[in-house]
Image (cartoon, rainbow, N blue to C red):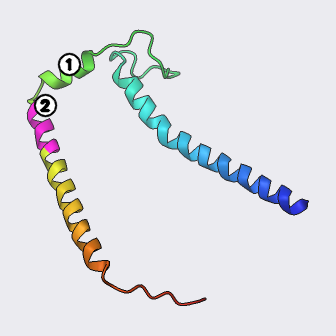
Amino acid sequence: MPNIRRTYLSQILLYMLLLAGVIATVLPFLYMISTSLKGTVYAFEIPPRLIPYHPTLKNFIAAWTSNRFDRYFINSLSVTVVTTALVVGLGSMMAFASSFRKLVIKPS
């Protein structure tokens, strides 16, 4: 019985750690989206609010219409597409070549 309880407690601890990791990973993205929907005055308020009272898209409009943002976006998109194509192509060739190699597993 103590072994089952120890396994159960270790699973609870594992899930608590995983949940803390998920929260630590997702919370900055939620804060970033929330801040992008706030006005300039409310972006640095103390204490910060996750959900803005008056969400606005003015920040997105200002970003898209200033400093040739469309050109920067197309540049980033083209670099992403080329990089992804290269990674998939080279990775596929390496996987194909390594599939003919015999895997040797030594008993421990």
Give the class, few, some or many, for how many residues have Cα within 10 Å of label 2's Cα (few <14, many ≥20). Answer: few
Q: Quadrant of residue 61?
A: top left
Element class at badge 1: helix
- Left or right of 43 in this view: 20: right
Q: Please provide percent x and percent y for residue 22.
A: 54, 43
Which is nearer the eye, 49 or 72? 72
* Quadrant the C terminus occupies: bottom right
Which residue shows up at 73% across the image and 49% down it? Answer: 12
Name the chief secondary structure element in magenta: helix
Which residue shows up at 26% across the image and 74% down it? Answer: 96
- Tally of numbered tags: 2
- Left or right of 16 in this view: 107: left
Query: Residues at badges 2 and 1 in contact (C-beta under 8 Å)?
Result: no
Q: Please provide percent x and percent y for residue 84.
A: 21, 54
Which is nearer the eye, 44 or 57? 57
Q: Please provide percent x and percent y for residue 81.
A: 17, 49
User: Where does label 1 land, which residue?
Assistant: 61
User: Where does label 2 land, which residue?
Assistant: 69
Q: Please provide percent x and percent y for residue 98.
A: 30, 79
Residue span colored magenta: 70-77
Residue with the most extreme right position: 1
- Amino acid found under the numbered disc labelled 1: Ile
